[in-house]
Amino acid sequence: MKEHIVNKITGRLKALQIPYSMEGDSITVGEEFVEIGYGSDLKKVRYDLTITIDEASRCVVVYVSTVDKYIMTVDGKLPPGESRKPQQVFRKVKHIIIDENGESNLITLDLADIPNTAKDCAIQCGWRFSTVLKMRKKPPVLLSASERVKALRINDDMDLAGVYLEDAETIVQKHSRRKKGGFFSRLFGRHSRGKS
């Protein structure tokens, strides 16, 4: 029964092309996604998920944590209501998947998808299920906080893969060389790849 639950969960992760690791009775995901707001506002979200399958107690426990890493805005100001908006663990984000032809596709992913898959498996097998949520209140960094970063413009020449600002004085370099895959592919750190 445990193997059935593990296969269902990992099968869903593979279908969504979300990297994961297995250690003992736990499946772990540590990934970054982009949440797109109004206009051209972008928010990078760190998503940490651990699913523990305890066969002895016939229980599936999901530990979920999300934290906003930074917000990039067009005008350099925090989006209206952002400071007052309650943080949500489960939200809809953008995710790149690559089809069998090697083409990249931008999809909308609900971060509740994998926990719901684990819950459905547990219920179908007659196991107990519980979720532990952790919402970290660390405020996101405005990428346009410094004068140098305010001059940044979002365009198809930018490579944002792996960008993370520790403080407002960090400089984000603009890459002049165009890269294959388009803006969103590079934003997610992925690109199209042809058949081997």
Image (tube, rainbow, N blue to C red):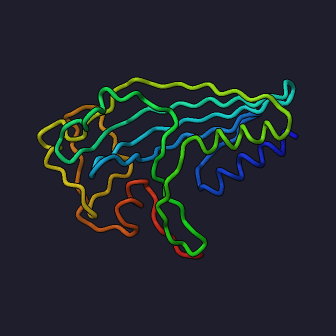
Rendered image quadrant of residue 169: top left
At which x and y percent is residue 145? 18, 36
Task: State left or right for residue 44 relative to residue 100.
Answer: left
Residue name at image x 51 percent, y 71 percent: 103
Task: State left or right for residue 97 relative to residue 177.
Answer: right
Residue name at image x 28 percent, y 32 percent: 81
At which x and y percent is residue 137? 40, 23
Rendered image quadrant of residue 188: bottom left
Pick the residue in front: 114 or 190: 114
Number of labelled discs? 0
Pick the residue in front: 34 or 32: 34
At which x and y percent is residue 91? 48, 40
At which x and y percent is residue 52? 72, 31
Where 140 sits versus 20, above or below? above
Residue name at image x 66 percent, y 40 percent: 116
Rendered-image quadrant of the C terminus? bottom right
Where 145 sits versus 193, above or below? above
Task: State left or right for residue 132 relative to residue 146.
Answer: right
Pick the residue in front: 162 or 95: 95
Rendered-image quadrant of the N terminus? top right
Residue name at image x 54 percent, y 35 percent: 48
Task: State left or right for residue 186 relative to residue 12.
Answer: left
